[in-house]
Image (cartoon, rainbow, N blue to C red):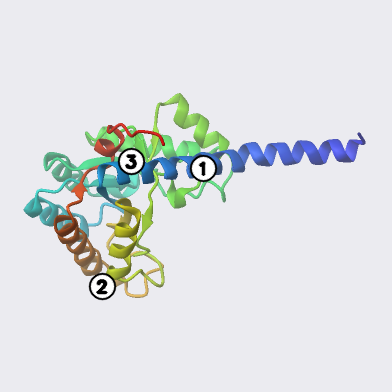
Amino acid sequence: MSWAVAIAVGVGGAFAAWFVLPWLLRRRAVRHLHRLCAARRAIVLTYDDGPGPRLSPALADLLARHGVRATFFMIGARAAGQPQIVQALQAAGQEIGSHTQTHLNAWKTAPLAPVRDIRAGRETLARLGAPSALFRPPFGKATLATRLHGWQNRLTFAFWTVDCRDSWESPRPVAEVLARIEAQGGGVVLMHDCDAPPRSPNPAGHPDHVLRLTEAIIAFAAEKQFSLLPFGALLAAPVREA
């Protein structure tokens, strides 16, 4: 084998270990979530990128009115600026997970920067009285370094199965979200409780959209006899392998 071939093989192996292995682990985790949701006929409401000063308290009130528990994956820097919202969600029995300190994309930054961002986000939540082993990587992106950090710290990487795209330029219509949940037999639903996502075509209307979508999913769950669970409760349920 020539030195050029050896280098190419080495680079390819490093690339596979750094990016491809975490991607494969994500695919396996998502398949497991599909099985868990279908086995329990469960819907998990999850909210990223908050807390939002307007939207998060409104969601807390909506969930409390319906007796529903959800999971909020918080950005540490935003949580530090809204400690009263973190504490109120905790007191209401809502589940809190980490979404890093500043929302770095692990695929687009220096190798160890995302690890520091994960650690800082968890430390911020712990200082606010909301320590958690649940972690949702920004954009769903992980590397070998962030995976190793997760294993060392016994973190649970929490992905999703239904993306509402409420922070995208073209959010999914409510009817399409409900159809996807029904087709999957349940699902882990991704929404955002930041007040104004930067990519949203209507940032000012985002809170009202998420509230309407949440209310629609809750009503749909009652009509179709789905259970509404926080993420941790879903994972605690055993599922039979086919």
SS class of the residue under badge 2? helix
Q: Name the residue type under label 2.
A: Gly
Tell me if mark 1 has few (under 14), some (14-19) or many (20+) residues whose alpha carbon lies within 10 angstroms of its own.
Answer: many
- Disc 1 marks which residue? 142
Image coordinates for residue 165, horizontal then vertical, percent: 37, 64
Sequence-wise, the earlier of marks 1 and 3 is 3
Sequence-wise, the earlier of marks 1 and 2 is 1
- Name the residue nearer the viewer: 187 or 103: 187
Tell me if mark 3 has few (under 14), some (14-19) or many (20+) residues whose alpha carbon lies within 10 angstroms of its own.
Answer: many
Farthest residue in the left direction?
A: 65
| Residue shown at 54% from the left, 44% from the top | 23
Sequence-wise, the earlier of marks 3 and 2 is 3
Image coordinates for residue 187, horizontal then vertical, percent: 32, 51
How much space separates mark 1 and mark 2, taking CA atoms? Answer: 31 Å
Q: Is residue 86 left or right of residue 172?
A: left
| Residue shown at 67% from the left, 41% from the top | 15
How much space separates mark 3 and mark 2, taking CA atoms? Answer: 33 Å
Q: Kindly tell me whether residue 48 is visible in this rendering.
A: no
- Disc 2 marks which residue? 205
Farthest residue in the top direction?
A: 152
Q: Name the residue type under label 3.
A: Leu
Question: Which quadrant of the figure contains the N terminus?
Answer: top right
Q: Residue 36 — which label? A: 3
Q: Is residue 160 above or below residue 156?
A: below
Q: Is residue 123 left or right of residue 218?
A: right
SS class of the residue under badge 3? helix
Q: Is residue 192 above or below residue 141?
A: below
Q: Is residue 60 left or right of residue 46?
A: left
Count of marks overlaid on the render: 3
Farthest residue in the right direction?
A: 2
